[in-house]
Image (spheres, rainbow, N blue to C red):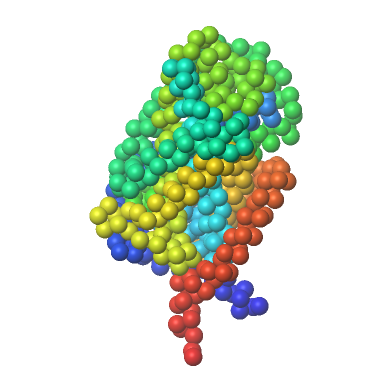
Amino acid sequence: MRSIWRRIFRTKPVGEIIAEGGHGEGGELKRSMSLTQLTMFSVGATLGTGIFVILGEAAPLAGPAVVVSFLLAAVTALFSALSYAELAGTIPVSGSSYSYAYATLGEVVAWVCGWCLLLEYAVSVSAVAVGWGQYLNEFFGQSTGWRIPAALSGPPGIDGGVVNLPAIAVVLLATVLLLRGASESATANAVMVVVKIGVLLFFCVIAFTAFDSDNLTPFAPLGMAGLSAAGAKVFFSYIGFDAASTAGEEAKNPRRDLPLAILLSLGIVTLVYVLVALASVGVLPWQRLSGSEASLAKVLEDATGSAWPSVVLSLGAVVAIASVVLTVLYGQTRILFAMSRDGLIPKVFQRVSPRRRVPAANTIIVSAFVAILAGLVPLGRLADATSIGTLFAFAVVNVGVIVLRSTRPDLPRNFRTPLFPLTPILGVLFCLYLMVNLDRQTWAVFAVWTLVGLAAYFAYGFRRSRLAQAAGACRPH
């Protein structure tokens, strides 16, 4: 048992992780991303997810105080973002928190973290794709009077749905872009992010003309419990600020640019979320925001009494949410690329196309899985399940900063987490606090997911990992 314990908690040397950066089977990834593109990647992965999809679910929990819930989630994300910034500048590779855990806490923790990232990225992009379909239908309905038939715009068992074709379509479009190359994907994402920010600013300008302060009272009708529950739910909307860390092997100057991109993107996203949330609860009584996947379009329609502003918003959302699908799908493929290179999953995920210099087979496999999930699984509890997996990964990153400062104080760090060790400790505590506020069903899903992941690790990665193979080669026969 002692031997097994040592083996599952073996760590991978930081120098080895960095030296392998960019290398895959059959080729190397191309370093082409600038600071602006990295920041846009993180903004693209984050901005829109919560506001366009989750606001209608969170407002009934907190009332007008949903604005504070967004700030609570932002503070939680900030502590973790500071830890991400330090580790991204110290270990600038594609594995994100998976690689950071491998260097600090051991192989089994890294595996569980990677498994949680699969929940974070693959499931969240599926949930967002479903929201994209809602806005596409909203746009068609308002501009032409025609809507996609229910059988083709929803998953089985939901309002007569059979398959969600719009959700599948947006995943396939993102796949085509990713297969063209990282630089091309970054350019397309930057354009979509500009559209997204423009649309949300347009929303704020229109909404604030109909702002009624009476809608803000009582401010927290369900008390601190409701505010915290909403904070745990809207934390889903901050998933993605770490997307820049998955581009560590394709950034031009990763040690300098990754920390900056992470922190800049979180600041931009938080400002926009708070403005949009405040505008929404100021226009509509919070009870009327309940249950609408396209809640912002509903706010504009009520604010102006006409359909054209919500048509513009819905069209902008169609473009904007597509960028979330693109960037989160990118992040998932790069994390699996790193896990495959370590031998924990099959080699096919690290194969690099010599022509495009991207992990093409990896991208196709992941996209097929996400498209099926988006097309056939209801949105339901996907957001909550994603949040708990992400909170776990963030907690691991905060612990990793503390461990690496202790074990490798000599490593060059372009960015240092301020107020160390208070900041990462607070990061862990905030993550645990939000996790506790998620319901039992979400915890049950997380427990089952983790157990399945551990079973997969012991069935495959435990013996096939490169560290295990190296240890076997060194063992005397």
Q: Quadrant of residue 196?
A: top left
Q: Position of 43 compared to 284: left or right?
A: left
Check the image and report above or below for 435 versus 229.
below
**Could you say which is closer to the camera, residue 284 or residue 295?**
295
Check the image and report above or below for 284 versus 35.
above
Residue at (71% x, 25% y) in the render: 220
Check the image and report above or below for 437 versus 131.
below
Residue at (40% x, 68% y) in the render: 16
Check the image and report above or below for 364 versus 374.
below
Q: Position of 89 compared to 353: left or right?
A: right
Residue 411 in sight: no
Residue 338 in sight: yes
Residue 318: x, y in percent? 43, 29
Residue at (45% x, 68% y) in the render: 343
Residue 379: x, y in percent? 58, 38
Residue 230: x, y in percent? 66, 34
Residue that protrudes farthest toward the left in the picture: 355
Q: Quadrant of residue 218?
A: top right
For the N terminus, give its image quadrant. bottom right
**Could you say which is closer to the camera, residue 96 or residue 427?**
96
**Could you say which is closer to the camera, residue 407 or residue 46?**
46
